[in-house]
Amino acid sequence: MSATTATGPDATDPPVPSAAAARALVAELVAAGVRDVVLAPGSRSAPLAYALHAAERAGWLRLHVRIDERSAAFVALGIARVRPAAVVTTSGTAVANLHPAVLEAAHSGAPLVVLTADRPHELRGVGANQTTEQVGIFGSAVRWHGELPADDAAPTRGVRSAVVRAVAAARGLRSGHPGPVHLNVAFRDPLAPADDWLPGEAPATHTDVAPAVALAAPMVLDRGPRTVIVAGDGAGAAAVRLAAASGWPVLAEPGSGARHAPGAVTAYRTLLADPDLGPRIERVVQFGRPTLSRPVSLLLARPDAQVVVVGPGPDWVDVAGTAAAVNGAVDVAGEITVDERAWAGRWAVASAAAERALAGEELAGPAVARAVLAAGGTVVLGSSMTIRDADLAGPVGQREGAARVFANRGLAGIDGTVSTATGLALATGGPVRALIGDLTFQHDVGGLARGRLEAEVDLQVIVLNDDGGSIFATLEHGAPDHSRDFDRLFATPQGLDIAALAAGFGARHVLVATAAELGTVLAEPGSGRSVVEVRLDGVTARDRALALTERIRAAVAASLADVDG
């Protein structure tokens, strides 16, 4: 830790224990590589607040303040999609409000460091105000958890070890399994420092944590079986490398990072229903977490298809329990065969037919998603219908200017989507678009809030407003037998005044009615926060979606018939 300086009337005296502990903790966070901390205000966490503010003034880190703990946690999660980040809260219900983001980080592997302030041990279990059992509150969701007790005699004891272990576990340095960690820190009064902290130069970054084990040798797959690559959420570069080496078709979700891979297929979930394609698959190589499509889930559950699961971490996704092999990495033997080339060619013909069927689609969910992704940049897709629209209609094979897509698919919740997008904008320093539905927008409209003293972000939130949860209409709940109860229990129309909500949080509002108007706002998003509203009729949108799927199926069948003819 670098030398620090105290100033003030008692500069010759050591800082109060709570301030000393907080300053040591902040210094060790910086030394461990954490450069962004999101703070939700509170009294018990005040020692950390003062120390973080001083560290920011010294240029050690960036501090982001949010008043809502749930939003703060998702802002930190958005930053953690780019680099490790921490969130700091006071005690009590503030800690519980972090849980949704902690769960999302756990299932998506984001290095999120949770720092919660707590009462000292003598005030626990005695009915003290705002006190609950915080140690272990996140259960198995965290990769590591620990506690720093209030120690007046040696306030910095154990700080370095705890922080190094926490950040290493969050980054998965020893386990290959990154995710959230929780460090509970007890502070005893006084909570305000008696002196000013001038941190000086930032501490050097630790580099002494090494991986525990080397990766196993890749599994080498034979040529021959009719194979497809399923790239689920977070599949990443490994799926792209195998696609390039193998020449096999790729069924890639928007959040996979693999839709630009050679062999990526448009509207793959519809193509799987074609009798000349889906039923003929003999082997599936799965990367990431497939989370969107029932046709893909059915494919992975087929007993006659060999499923090979690929993933570097200790967990693997095998929902149907059919995996024939699980390995950290795979490779393919030899050059592509004539039969494999013909197999890939049929998928390419079908994909091109699907592209033609999607061209000229009216302003509806799929068309909006296609336009947003085609515009490039950093895009956050909301769960529910928007990511499925993007999955169906989003462009594939686009390399130059391809959108960098993020989505909270760890648990596929709609919580915190606007806040996650805000965190990504803070982390990247560039513009971010979020494409979400009206209920997702309402669920995290507070994510638009920006304190007058906080940095502005360039965030364009595009809201598909069909006044309700249209995704349920695609499930069994949308069947005619349940029509009497559907709106009340599932669609839940809210009648939101999105323009008024945007204005209340200081964001610009734009109402889009045509594809041309959408193109204009995508080309010229402007700076700061804006909300682009696209109003859709829920019933009409559902009918259009069904009609579009039928058009794709017909176009694919006709194109394959022409090849065979």
Image (tube, rainbow, N blue to C red):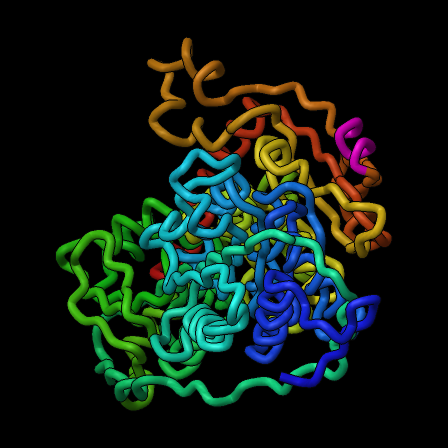
**Image location (x, y in percent) of residue 234:** 45, 64
- Depth check, front residue: 59 or 47: 47
**Image location (x, y in percent) of residue 149:** 45, 60
Give the number of callouts.
0
In the rendered structure, does residue 177 fall within the stretch colored magenta? no
- Depth check, front residue: 138 or 244: 138
Among the 4 quarters of the image, the one containing residue 363 = top right
Q: Is residue 486 left or right of residue 445?
A: left
Among the 4 quarters of the image, the one containing residue 516 = top right
Which residue is at 39% across, 83% downward?
A: 245
Q: Is residue 513 above or below residue 138?
A: above
Which residue is at 78% across, 72% downward?
A: 11
In the rendered structure, does residue 500 fall within the stretch colored magenta? yes
Classify the position of the N terminus by image quarter. Answer: bottom right
Q: Is residue 307 above or below residue 94?
A: below
Magenta range: 499-505
Q: Is residue 459 visible?
A: yes
- Depth check, front residue: 253 or 105: 105
**Image location (x, y in percent) of residue 450:** 77, 45
Q: Is residue 462 above or below residue 561?
A: above
**Image location (x, y in percent) of residue 519:** 78, 48
- Depth check, front residue: 112 or 512: 112
Q: Is residue 557 visible?
A: no
Classify the position of the C terminus by image quarter. Answer: bottom left
Which residue is at 81% across, 72% downward?
A: 7
Q: Main secondary structure of the magenta part?
A: helix
Q: Is residue 508 left or right of residue 157?
A: right
Q: Is residue 307 left or right of residue 14?
A: left
